[in-house]
Image (cartoon, rainbow, N blue to C red):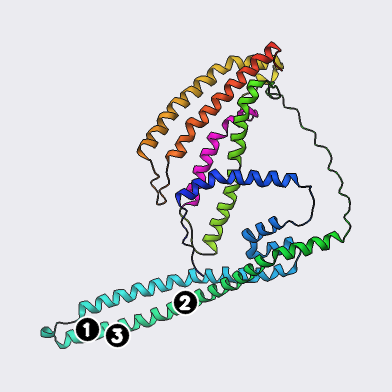
Amino acid sequence: MPSLTFVMPHWLYWAGLLVFPLIATYLVRRQMRVAPHSRPSLFIAYLFWLTAGFLGIHRFYLRSALGFVFIPVFLFIIYANAQVREVRDDTSRTFAALEAAQNEARIAKPEPDRATPEANAQYERAQGVVKQRQQEYAVAKAVTDQWYSRARWGAIVLAILLLGDAVMLPGLVRRQIQREAAVPHRPVAEPPPVVAEPVLAEDPTLHFHSRITDRIEWINVKAGEYVAWWSLIAVFVYYYEVLARFVFNSPTNWVHESMFLMFGMQYMLSGAYAYREDQHVRVDVIYAKFSPRGKAIADIVTSVFFFIFIGTMLVTGYRFAADAVNVGEHSFTEWGIQYWPVKLAIPIGAALLLLQGVSKLIKDILFVARRGA
């Protein structure tokens, strides 16, 4: 089975974070414009083919029993790779023993002018050990090569099946739609309405609107929706890591680092959106007992501490990021990803939080004054 030698380029990582949310938003909006239905979708079929086609999931999605053909082939590849991992230790051990025997034979080889019967006998014994170690290594390597070959042939069979289905998927989807169209669909019962539980400590200005605050919050809403798509990237990336590690025996050196850096940036950039949606933790033992007007007054009073904290984070975060940008800071790992864009998310997130704090203060003042709704 061939190993994966793909290494995530730095430009591809940053481009993925920038472009993926735009593509995902476009696809979702395009799908929302189409009337909802339960018939197979070619896009979903290809998505299943790409991400789980080795198990025949795209065939099961189209209700084709041929999906069961993929499962034994994939399980055989898993078994062959497991055998490769086991016999590879024997190959490494016998190879190391062969090198040690060859080194001892070189040391035991007598000089022509200093050859004695004892030295010649010792050299012959060393040569015999070398031949024995060569035979042991040849046997171990033959077993390893045999399992490598089996895994490779399994991969070839699986690749042929997947490539064939990649060509046939449009026709398979079209025929499945025709079969389902010939069967009358039963009406789907509407789900019962969901009654939301009352939230005692809810922000009284959560649904309060004014022109200036709506414009400020539009920025934070778009920023929050943009970075929310990064969570979906993690699903695909960790999925790739599992396949690369356990199917291709090729674990990566960038998945874990790339994802915790991504989630760190997401945490900073989505803070303002979470504040706008009233999703931050609040000590509401006393706050929950206030009236809506009392809650707004309490928010105005405590906003002083909020702006002190955000101002401090904005200034120190800017210095922190500026130092990283000036030196072009990279991580100390083998991947060596740039750190300065990650640290730049700190002052950007603080600026978004500052904007949302200003919007919240304006809404609280207008709410108390009963104006501007």
Q: Quick one: which residue is furthest to the bottom in this view?
A: 117
The range drawn in magenta is 254-280
Report the quarter where the C terminus lies.
Answer: top right
Q: Nearer the viewer, residue 362 or 302?
A: 362
Residue lying at 61% horizontally and 28% vertically, measured from the top left: 275
In the picture, measured across the screen, residue 345 lies left or right of residue 330, that is right
In terms of sequence position, does the residue under pointer 2 or pointer 1 come before the other?
1
Q: Where residue 128 is drawn, which disc sits there?
A: 3
Residue 277 lies, with reference to residue 15, above or below; the image says above
Label 3 SS: helix
| Number of marks drawn | 3
Q: Which dot, 3 or 2, sits closer to the camera?
A: 2
Residue 257 lies, with reference to residue 280, above or below; the image says below
Three-letter code for the amino acid on which mark 3 is drawn? Gly
In terms of sequence position, does the residue under pointer 3 or pointer 2 come before the other?
3
* Residue 328 spot, x, y in % from top left: 37, 40
Three-letter code for the amino acid on which mark 2 is drawn? Asp
Residue 269 lies, with reference to residue 153, above or below; the image says above
Identify the residue position indicated by label 1 in the image.
122
* Residue 306 spot, x, y in % from top left: 54, 21
Identify the residue position indicated by label 2 in the image.
145
